[in-house]
Amino acid sequence: MDVQKQRARYLRNNMTDCERKLWSIIRNRQFYGYRFLRQYCIGSYIVDFICREKKVIIEVDGGQHNQLNNISYDSIRTNYLNSLGYKVIRFWNNDIEQNIEGVYIKLKEILNIND
């Protein structure tokens, strides 16, 4: 198994609390029948969550993503993923912790779900 797949497996087994909370909502096609995968390898990157059917990637970001070097890295990474046709959505940890309903509504918007 290559190093990146080992890293993805490690990340799946060691999710953050916020990743776990979001995963509890979107796993097993619970979110309007869409299939999400977690810690998925694309090129040289590992994304937090992906819905391949809708080409949507969800990233769960903590405070370290406000640091200058991470802002630059995230921008390069997002541009690469966009170039492959993916839409990258970012949620801050505190959004997931304090406003999971808002996250849910935003995901519905992104996936064009009207119920």
Image: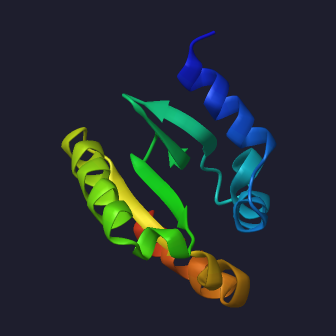
Percent coordinates x, y for residue 4 in the rendering: 54, 24
Tell me if residue 73 comes above or below residue 11 in the rendering: below
Q: Position of residue 60 (x, y in %)?
A: 56, 64
> Which is more toward the observer, 42 or 71?
71
Here the colouring is rainbow
Location of residue 109 (image quadrant): bottom left
Specify the quadrant that holds the C terminus.
bottom right
Residue at (65, 51) in percent of width and height: 33
Residue 29 image position (x, y, % from top left) = 70, 48
Please say if 73 is above or below 5.
Answer: below
Is 35 on the left or on the right of 66, as rendered?
Answer: right
Residue 35, compared with residue 30, is above or below; it is above
Q: Position of residue 86 (x, y in %)?
A: 32, 47
The residue shown at (37%, 58%) is 88
Instruction: Evaluate whether residue 14 shows in this view.
Output: yes
How many numbered marks does the figure carry?
A: 0
Q: Furthest residue to the bottom?
A: 98
Query: Residue 89 or 77: which is nearer the viewer?
Result: 77
Q: Is residue 36 above or below residue 23?
A: above
Residue 114 visible here: no
* The residue positioned farthest toward the top in the image shown: 1
Q: What residue appears at the point 36 percent right and 28 percent down from the top-left corner?
A: 43
- The quarter of the picture where residue 2 lies is top right
Q: Residue at x 38, y 62 (%)?
A: 70
Front-most of residues 107 and 95: 95
Position of the N terminus by quadrant: top right
